[in-house]
Image (cartoon, rainbow, N blue to C red):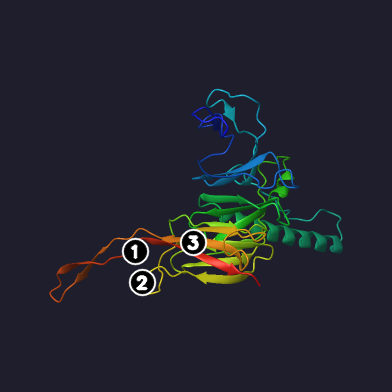
Amino acid sequence: DTSLPGREGMIARLGKTRRSHDGQKGIPSALAFPKCEGAGGPSNVFAVGTYSPASIYIYDDRMSNGYKPAGTIVLHGGLTVVGHGRKFSRKKRRFGQAGTTDNQGDGEEEKEEESLFSSARVNWFQSRARGGVTQLTWAPTASSNPYTLFSASRRSNTVLSWDVRALSGKDLNGDASSRPICGLTSYARDGDTNQRLEFELDETGRKMFVGCGASESCVKIYDVRSGALEDTIKVEANRNGQCMDAVNGVSYFPLLNGHGIGAQKYKGLLTVAVGSRRFDEQYSDDEDGNGVREVVEERPGALQLYAFKKK
């Protein structure tokens, strides 16, 4: 409780025991609370992402009043967006039922092909989120779909969006928590790095700013609904006007109703953090084949500010 400073608090466990099969596994690495509670969006829920094994679960935060002893609260019964629970397998029918007509057989084949296509799409989205969750963000209040959850994973080349309303479905066994869902849209980026690459949404939830790895060194701007790439901001970090570092942090600040410096001319500001760990010492061979140590000064990183003009 932020109104009561100090060390008093509640500790919630993701499972009853470490070896129990119930609950969410892995090290918690990302938390996200809806930004539009009471405004037509999700309420009394929050999302938890974990590392190794990677998973995303949705929990109900309506806990009993008062503090309980540490470790007695168990977040059990969460709904799985990306998880490591029981596999959702759909048994395919190898032979048609006796007495069916040719037309009925054609209809079953079409349904089976559609099911296989849907299953492949689900597996594609699920596999892109299995590298360890690094960031979770809910859609803002002004978004067209406030039930959208966005996620980014370690060494993943995409940022994914999920519609949590699909979690109300159940699998063939009647279990709602083990049914993997399909993502809405994917937003490509260069994620081949061990760094944590961030993304950001504008205040309307229509634009997404995605930081990319060192091979691209840019910020990509996407249309959230269609997933189309609208613009690219090439980041310059060193003295030569080149950048070989990852864009690991982005933050967008809207200038609304004429408030703030430059609000009459600009509609928003984008802060970009660029950098990676570098070693100043480099080794090279001379004519005799001996190693020569050279000291090359490298800028450790940069913090840049971009302004978006009003149209």
Q: Secondary structure at mark 1?
A: loop
Residue 9: x and y in percent read 54, 29
Q: Is residue 291 rendered to the left or right of residue 241?
A: left
Which residue matches tag 2?
239
Q: Is residue 248 rendered to the left or right of residue 14?
A: left
Q: Quadrant of the N terminus?
A: top right
The picture quadrant where one finds residue 214 is bottom left
Q: How many marks?
A: 3
Q: Earlier in the sequence, mark 3 or mark 2?
A: 2
Q: Secondary structure at mark 2?
A: loop
Give the answer, above or below, for where 247 lies relative to 83: below
The picture quadrant where one finds residue 300 is bottom left
**How dense is the environment of label 3, judged by Cα within 10 Å: few (below 14), some, or many (20 and up)?**
many
Answer yes or no: is residue 171 visible: no
Give the answer, above or below, for where 166 lies relative to 45: below
Residue 292: x and y in percent read 17, 68
Which residue matches tag 1?
299
Q: Is residue 76 rendered to the left or right of residue 297?
A: right
Which residue matches tag 3?
272
Q: Amino acid at mark 3?
A: Val
Q: Are marks 2 and 1 in contact (CB under 8 Å)?
A: yes
Q: Earlier in the sequence, mark 2 or mark 1?
A: 2
Residue 107: x and y in percent read 82, 61
Residue 257: x and y in percent read 67, 59
Q: Amino acid at mark 2?
A: Arg
Q: Earlier in the sequence, mark 3 or mark 1?
A: 3
Q: Amino acid at mark 1?
A: Arg
